[in-house]
Amino acid sequence: MIQIKTEAEFAKMREAGKVVEEALLTLGNAVEPGITTWELDEIAKKVFDKHGAISSSFHYGDPPFPGQICVSPNEVIVHGIPRKDIVLKEGDIVTCDVCCSLDGMHADAARTFAVGKISDEAAKLVRVTEECFWKGFEKVSTDNRIGDISSAVQAHAESFGYGVIRELTGHGIGHQLHEDPDVPNYGRFGHGPRIVKGMAFCIEPMISMGRREIAVLGDEWTVITRDRKYAAHYENTIIVTENGPEIITLTEGKNV
């Protein structure tokens, strides 16, 4: 069931969104060759602790996720576990997926960062994945349905020959990290739940440079592309207010 939020709940989500954004900005400045994914996790924790926020990822699920954030390099699509022995190198890309709760309400966002100088092909993947988010965001309107977002993301990604990951989707968010509705990155225009005022959800294109098939590693969390091609991920939390959609994890470009 889709949970409709009040303005008071949106206000709390905005505060959580500010923490997520600060963490991502701090992480983006820290990403460089030689840093470990564990060190990035520690950087995010310091931002959470400064604001009294709680990681939404830590101990989530079964088995419990061990990191404060998900840190996913190269062919890892999502849910990369931060480790001291994973050292980023020049030419890598790395996704930091950051979510936290503050005063009982959650916010969630992800960015894929370049590690030093990356190839033109990798840079294009990162750029197009972000563009896919904005194509989807353009469809966030009370005149539209979730499928309109999904079909816009899919059309843009596939126009470049990229794979659209299907097993993993965007999601509703609020009192819980994952709520209804699912927000797939593929679908049909005019289908899915109608978008209404009071909804809150995440649009998060997860796009592969190669094929869309995935595999899950033995840790039961790390999701990779089956062909080991690079994948990128771009996500924001959106609330649908009486004034239209608002991105609460991005200071600039909040509204359509």
Image: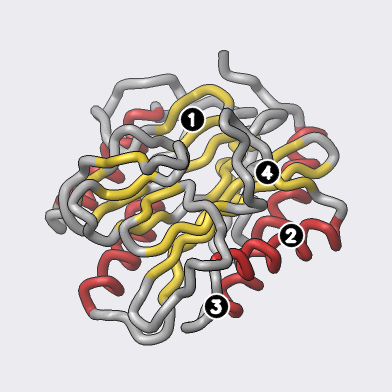
Q: Is residue 124 above or below residue 53?
A: below
Q: Mark 3 points at which residue?
A: 35
- Alpha carbons under labels 4 and 3: distance apart: 21 Å
Mark 3 or 1, nearer chain start: 3
Q: Name the residue under label 4.
A: 58
Q: Mark 1 points at which residue?
A: 142
- Alpha carbons under labels 2 and 4: distance apart: 10 Å
Question: Could you tell me the amino acid type at mark 2?
Answer: Lys
Mark 4 or 1, nearer chain start: 4
CB under 8 Å between discs 4 and 3: no
Within the image, what quadrant is residue 30 found in? bottom right
Q: Which of marks 2 and 1 is in front?
A: 2
Q: Which of marks 4 and 1 is in front?
A: 4
Question: Could you tell me the amino acid type at mark 3?
Answer: Ile
Question: Could you tell me the amino acid type at mark 4?
Answer: Phe
Image position, residue 26 (x, y; %): 65, 72
In the foreground, 74 or 3: 74
Image position, residue 207 (x, y; %): 29, 51
Quick check: 234 left or right of 3?
Answer: left
SS under mark 1: loop
Question: Could you tell me the amino acid type at mark 1?
Answer: Thr
Q: Which of marks 3 and 1 is in front?
A: 3
- Alpha carbons under labels 3 and 2: distance apart: 16 Å
Image position, residue 18 (x, y; %): 72, 57
SS under mark 2: helix
Quick check: 247 left or right of 78?
Answer: right
In the foreground, 92 or 108: 92
User: Which class describes the residues within 10 Å of circle 2: few (<14), some (14-19), or many (20+)?
Assistant: some
Q: Name the residue under label 2.
A: 45
